[in-house]
Image (tube, grey):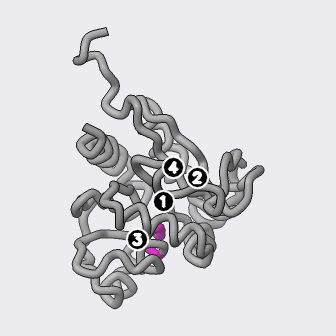
Amino acid sequence: MSHSDRQPLEGTTVGIFLAPEGSEEVEFTEPRQAVSDAGAAVEVLGSETGEARTVNNDLEWSDSYEVENTFEGVSANDYDALIVPGGTVGADTLRTDEDAVELLRQHLADGKPAGVICHGPWTLIEADVIDGRTLTSYSSLQTDVRNAGGEWVDEEVVVDDGLVTSRDPDDLDAFCDAIVDEFAATAE
């Protein structure tokens, strides 16, 4: 196999957060598929192992997915990149999980990339890692972002020093492309 045939994320490990319930399904499944298709090993992280149920449009129950490891049971050293999906309830639950917040804080402190979409930036705010950064999110979080020292912009996808953010499921194509590119750039 020649070097040019190599998958962009081959040899990288990506952790994707999943709340016990309430994460937005497409914001979990599409980024997970994108990085997996690009060659990454993907591990689903949650507050506890077992099944976690996702939602569609915040309010409709959808499918359940297996959580493979707990936030408490892993460290930032285990991952080359992290992904945090949205979903109002899911994101609110994740930001109150101290182990999830600490994992994300340490990961970014180590200069590693992350993709965070929709209401996911609540976890970034809780981790106190957005002061001086430019990002986007679901529009209702813009005051939260500004109050935490971030610059909120209304764009499909924003990349700031390894942090990739998007607004909502309509931005998923751009978000998935950007996380693969950003994660690959860091992996080289």
Region of the chain picked out in magenta, as a range? 117-122
The answer to whether 119 is drawn above or below residue 172 in the figure is below
Mark sitting earlier along the chain (2/3): 2
Cα distance in 3D space between marks 1 and 3: 13 Å
Q: Is residue 85 in the magenta section? A: no
Whole-Å distance between the Cαs marked 4 and 2? Answer: 16 Å
Relative vertical location of residue 151 with respect to residue 59 in this rendering, above or below: below
Which residue is at the far bottom?
A: 147
Q: Which mark is residue 138?
A: 3
> Is residue 54 in view from this perspective?
yes
What distance separates the C-alpha of mark 1 from that of mark 4? 9 Å
Q: Which residue is mark 2?
A: 25
Residue 117 in picture, x, y percent from top left:
42, 61
Residue 76 in percent (x, y) is at: 47, 57
Residue 16: percent from the left, percent from the top? 52, 51
Residues marked 2 and 3 touching at CB (< 8 Å): no
Left or right: 65 as drawn, with respect to 17: right
Mark toward the start of the polypeptide (1 vs 2): 2
Q: Earlier in the sequence, mark 3 or mark 4?
A: 4
Q: Which residue is mark 4?
A: 15
